[in-house]
Image: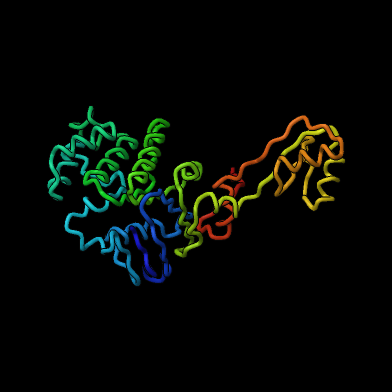
Amino acid sequence: MIEVENLSKRYGDTLAVDDLSFTVVPGRVTGFLGPNGAGKSTTMRMILGLDRPTAGRALVAGRPYEELDRPLTVVGALLDAKGVNGARSAYHHLLALAVSNGLPESRVHEVLDMVGLSAVARKRAQGFSLGMGQRLGIAAALLGRPSIVVLDEPVNGLDPEGVLWARELMKRLASEGCTVLVSSHLMNEMAVTADHLVIIARGRLLVDSPTDAFIEEHSRASVFARVSDPEALKEALETEGIHSEQLPDGRIEALEVTAQRVGELASARRVAVYEMAQQTASLEEAFMQLTAQQTEYRAGLEVQR
């Protein structure tokens, strides 16, 4: 597991992480979300022993990262795909990591093939595209067959095929019993990848919940209906205490109700239904609603010319 216990980090007058506690367990993909400046990267750096906490502690497999003898065999991480000596080839970059952790050269060839870089293994990393760099970073994270994997924006720069590959990889690792912690700003991708969510803002924990439960709790469910008599349907809905609005295109939007219930009420009033759609809740909507007042950097919509 990854255990974060009352973790805090202060940089001068700035409290980047504030008494943060959560646990990431094996067998599921845990999404680590938050607005810019929330403290995600700082937390991940402390988990991996790159920053020293001001207070609290972070444990991987029950120990601080710096106490691990062969860290790549316990936890693999991708924090910065550009953190590679560009003069080295992909092969030699991975070989250096393998040798430093007592891993066989054969494993280098295995992970290069796994991430689809075998054909460019002898090319210098400085010539790699962003997506290729991401694949190399993932290869390094998987080199030691770790039981814990920590990934920061792993699909950044990947093409659609690469995004699907990375998603399936994370799910497969979790299904095999790995502990997977992944940070991303892509809400749609997290919605279909993460089984569990840890959301922070201003360094503090906001949510530690299964993904489905979080979306259901923080999103507004609604039904859109195009009917023969909008006013009659609105009246039927209001009688049942269901708030509704008529949209400019003539459709009725009914809030916090199922399509089945709207259909039943329309039938009872003999209102013909021409079209009906249940709006499914989205992770993006739920996330924006939760963090609306927690965003440190907010851009205006007006364009100055």
Q: Is residue 288 visible?
A: yes
Residue 2's place in the image compared with 14, above or below, is above
Q: Where is the C terminus found, in terms of image quarters?
A: top right
Q: Quadrant of residue 262?
A: top right
Q: Where is the N terminus found, in terms of image quarters?
A: bottom left
Q: Along the line of sight, which residue is nearer the eye, 101 or 256?
A: 256
Q: Quadrant of residue 224?
A: top right
Q: Residue 83: percent from the left, percent from the top?
A: 26, 47
Give the residue displayed 28% in from the left and 31% down from the top. 116
Q: Is residue 79 visible?
A: no
Q: Residue 36: percent from the left, percent from the top?
A: 46, 54
Residue 291's place in the image compared with 170, above or below, is below
Residue 30's place in the image compared with 46, above or below, is above
Q: Residue 29: percent from the left, percent from the top?
A: 40, 48
Give the residue displayed 26% in from the left and 44% down from the top. 142
Give the residue displayed 36% in from the left and 53% down from the top. 26
Q: Along the line of sight, which residue is nearer the eye, 92 or 227?
A: 227
Can you name the residue that lies furthest to the top here? 119
Display coloring: rainbow
Q: Residue 196: percent from the left, percent from the top?
A: 46, 52
Give the residue displayed 27% in from the left and 34% down from the top. 114
Residue 66's place in the image compared with 239, above or below, is below
In the displayed structure, does residue 214 sit left or right of residue 93? right
Mark count: 0
